[in-house]
């Protein structure tokens, strides 16, 4: 099975139409159709949005190995234009002690904020 065929199978399993999938991912329906008709695979630049939309790991998409298929995504995509990108990149530069202090600060903020209290 090609990657494109696997995607089409997952689109159906998840209950999307090809048009809905296209609207969500920004991948033209003609491209999605080419995966079936011409047995083509998507470009590497499209794999992450496909995985995010179908809630699968890139490993499963490429390999088709059931053991790696999951509906629980354990990664977050952050665009460089988002404030979170700055936070993540700066966090990675910190030493362990600084990271622990920052995590402690975040926990303290969450406890003080009414929107995070349950």
Image (tube, rainbow, N blue to C red):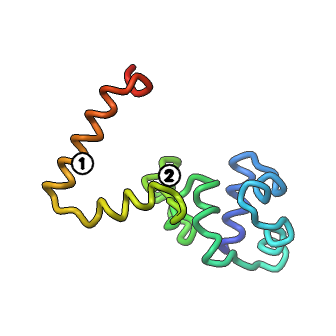
Instruction: First in sequence, mark 1 or 2: give its number.
Output: 2
Report the front residue among 91 and 34: 91
Q: Quadrant of residue 88?
A: bottom left
Q: Quadrant of residue 84?
A: bottom left
* Rendered residue at 65%/70% (across/down): 46
Residue 109 location (% of width, % of height): 31, 34
Q: Secondary structure at mark 2?
A: loop
Report the front residue among 66 and 29: 29
Residue 40 location (% of width, % of height): 74, 79
Residue 3 location (% of width, % of height): 65, 72
* Rendered residue at 50%/52% (across/down): 70
Report the front residue among 58 and 104: 104
Is 69 left or right of 108, judged from the image as shown? right
Residue sitting at the far left: 97
* Rendered residue at 84%/69% (across/down): 33
Q: Which mark is residue 102?
A: 1
Residue 49 location (% of width, % of height): 62, 62
Cβ–Cβ under 8 Å for marks 1 and 2: no
The residue wearing badge 2 is: 70
Is 55 left or right of 112, judged from the image as shown? right
Picture quarter with the C terminus:
top left
* Rendered residue at 67%/74% (across/down): 2
Q: Is residue 86 above or below residue 34?
A: above
Q: Secondary structure at mark 1?
A: helix
- The image shows a total of numbered marks equal to 2
Q: Quick one: label 1, few (<14), some, or many (20+) residues within 10 Å?
A: some
Picture quarter with the N terminus:
bottom right
Q: Quick one: label 2, few (<14), some, or many (20+) residues within 10 Å?
A: few
Is 49 left or right of 63, judged from the image as shown? right
Q: Nearer the viewer, mark 1 or mark 2?
A: 1
């Amino acid at each position: 099975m090609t990657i494109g065929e696997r995607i089409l199978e997952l689109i159906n399993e998840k209950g999307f139409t090809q048009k809905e999938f296209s609207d969500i991912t920004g991948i033209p329906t003609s491209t999605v159709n080419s995966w079936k008709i011409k047995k083509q695979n998507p470009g590497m630049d499209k794999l992450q949005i496909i995985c995010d939309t179908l809630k699968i790991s890139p490993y499963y998409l490429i390999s088709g190995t059931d053991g790696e298929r999951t509906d629980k995504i354990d990664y977050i995509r952050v665009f460089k234009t988002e404030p979170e990108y700055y936070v993540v990149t700066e966090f990675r530069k910190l030493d362990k002690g600084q990271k622990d202090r920052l995590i402690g600060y975040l926990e303290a903020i969450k406890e003080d904020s009414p929107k995070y209290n349950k």
